[in-house]
Image: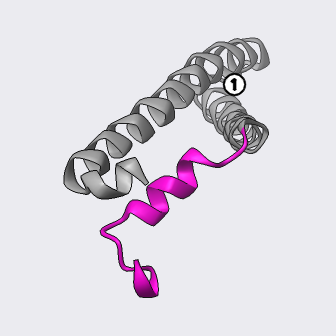
Amino acid sequence: MPNGIDGGHEQIHYMRTIPICIIMTKTLSFAAIHFTVAFSLVYLMTGSLMTGGLVALVEPCVNTLAFHLHEKLWTRRQTERTARAFPVLATA
Protein backbone atom coordinates (compact mmCIF):
# COMPACT_ATOMS: atom_id res chain seq x y z
CA MET A 1 0.00 0.00 0.00
CA PRO A 2 1.15 3.59 -0.49
CA ASN A 3 3.33 5.23 2.16
CA GLY A 4 3.88 1.90 3.92
CA ILE A 5 0.46 2.04 5.60
CA ASP A 6 -0.84 -1.49 5.44
CA GLY A 7 -2.05 -2.39 8.90
CA GLY A 8 1.21 -4.04 9.93
CA HIS A 9 1.39 -6.40 6.96
CA GLU A 10 4.72 -4.94 5.86
CA GLN A 11 6.35 -5.76 9.21
CA ILE A 12 4.94 -9.30 9.22
CA HIS A 13 6.07 -9.85 5.63
CA TYR A 14 9.53 -8.65 6.68
CA MET A 15 9.55 -11.15 9.57
CA ARG A 16 8.74 -14.00 7.18
CA THR A 17 11.61 -13.04 4.89
CA ILE A 18 14.37 -12.86 7.54
CA PRO A 19 16.91 -15.56 6.70
CA ILE A 20 17.17 -18.38 9.23
CA CYS A 21 20.84 -17.52 9.84
CA ILE A 22 19.78 -14.07 11.09
CA ILE A 23 17.08 -15.55 13.31
CA MET A 24 19.54 -18.10 14.73
CA THR A 25 22.16 -15.38 15.28
CA LYS A 26 19.60 -13.41 17.27
CA THR A 27 18.71 -16.55 19.23
CA LEU A 28 22.36 -17.35 19.99
CA SER A 29 23.02 -13.75 21.02
CA PHE A 30 20.07 -14.00 23.40
CA ALA A 31 21.51 -17.25 24.77
CA ALA A 32 24.91 -15.65 25.45
CA ILE A 33 23.35 -12.76 27.34
CA HIS A 34 21.08 -15.12 29.23
CA PHE A 35 24.01 -17.38 30.17
CA THR A 36 25.94 -14.42 31.58
CA VAL A 37 22.99 -13.13 33.59
CA ALA A 38 22.06 -16.58 34.92
CA PHE A 39 25.62 -17.39 35.98
CA SER A 40 26.17 -14.02 37.62
CA LEU A 41 22.88 -14.07 39.51
CA VAL A 42 23.25 -17.63 40.84
CA TYR A 43 26.90 -17.06 41.72
CA LEU A 44 26.01 -13.90 43.64
CA MET A 45 23.19 -15.73 45.45
CA THR A 46 25.15 -18.89 46.34
CA GLY A 47 28.83 -18.00 46.09
CA SER A 48 29.31 -21.31 44.27
CA LEU A 49 31.00 -21.40 40.87
CA MET A 50 29.75 -24.98 40.39
CA THR A 51 26.10 -24.15 41.08
CA GLY A 52 26.32 -20.93 39.06
CA GLY A 53 27.85 -22.81 36.15
CA LEU A 54 25.35 -25.66 36.21
CA VAL A 55 22.33 -23.39 36.40
CA ALA A 56 23.84 -21.09 33.79
CA LEU A 57 24.24 -24.02 31.38
CA VAL A 58 20.91 -25.74 31.86
CA GLU A 59 18.46 -22.89 32.32
CA PRO A 60 19.47 -20.77 29.28
CA CYS A 61 19.50 -23.85 27.04
CA VAL A 62 15.89 -24.55 27.92
CA ASN A 63 14.97 -20.87 27.69
CA THR A 64 16.68 -20.47 24.31
CA LEU A 65 14.69 -23.34 22.86
CA ALA A 66 11.50 -21.92 24.36
CA PHE A 67 12.34 -18.47 22.92
CA HIS A 68 12.97 -19.87 19.43
CA LEU A 69 9.70 -21.80 19.47
CA HIS A 70 7.86 -18.75 20.82
CA GLU A 71 9.22 -16.60 17.96
CA LYS A 72 8.10 -19.16 15.36
CA LEU A 73 4.61 -19.47 16.89
CA TRP A 74 4.26 -15.72 17.30
CA THR A 75 5.20 -15.07 13.66
CA ARG A 76 2.78 -17.76 12.48
CA ARG A 77 -0.01 -16.25 14.61
CA GLN A 78 0.65 -12.75 13.27
CA THR A 79 0.77 -14.03 9.69
CA GLU A 80 -2.56 -15.82 10.11
CA ARG A 81 -4.17 -12.73 11.64
CA THR A 82 -2.93 -10.57 8.79
CA ALA A 83 -4.20 -13.07 6.20
CA ARG A 84 -7.65 -12.97 7.80
CA ALA A 85 -7.67 -9.17 8.09
CA PHE A 86 -6.27 -8.52 4.62
CA PRO A 87 -7.26 -11.45 2.37
CA VAL A 88 -6.24 -9.54 -0.78
CA LEU A 89 -2.68 -9.13 0.55
CA ALA A 90 -2.47 -12.83 1.44
CA THR A 91 -3.06 -13.82 -2.19
CA ALA A 92 -0.69 -11.22 -3.66
User: On screen, 76 above or below 15?
Assistant: above
Viewport quadrant of the N terminus: bottom left
Bounds of the magenta segment: 1-19
- Residue 3 is situated, as x and y percent measured from the top left of the image, at 44, 87
Q: Quadrant of residue 44?
A: top right
Disc 1 crowd rating (10 Å Cα; few below 14, some 14-19, many 20+) is: few
Residue for point 30% across, 68% down: 7
Q: Report the amino acid beneath label 1.
A: Gly
Q: Secondary structure at mark 1?
A: loop
Residue for point 71% across, 12% down: 54
Q: Nearer the viewer, residue 72 or 25?
A: 72
Horizontal side of 68 relative to 58 (left or right) equals left
- The colour scheme applied to this rendered structure is one colour
Tell whether position 57 is magenta. Answer: no
- Residue 4 is situated, as x and y percent measured from the top left of the image, at 45, 80
Q: Nearer the viewer, residue 60 or 48?
A: 60
Residue occupying the far bottom of the picture: 3
Residue for point 50% across, 54% down: 13
Horizontal side of 80 relative to 2 (left or right) equals left
Horizontal side of 3 relative to 18 (left or right) equals left
User: On screen, 88 above or below 42?
Assistant: below
- Residue 39 is situated, as x and y percent measured from the top left of the image, at 70, 29
Viewport quadrant of the C terminus: bottom left
User: On screen, 31 above or below 57?
Assistant: below
Tell whether position 13 is magenta. Answer: yes
Residue for point 65% across, 39% down: 37
Q: Quadrant of residue 16?
A: top right
Q: Nearer the viewer, residue 92 or 8?
A: 92
Q: Nearer the viewer, residue 53 or 88?
A: 88
Label 1 sits on residue: 47
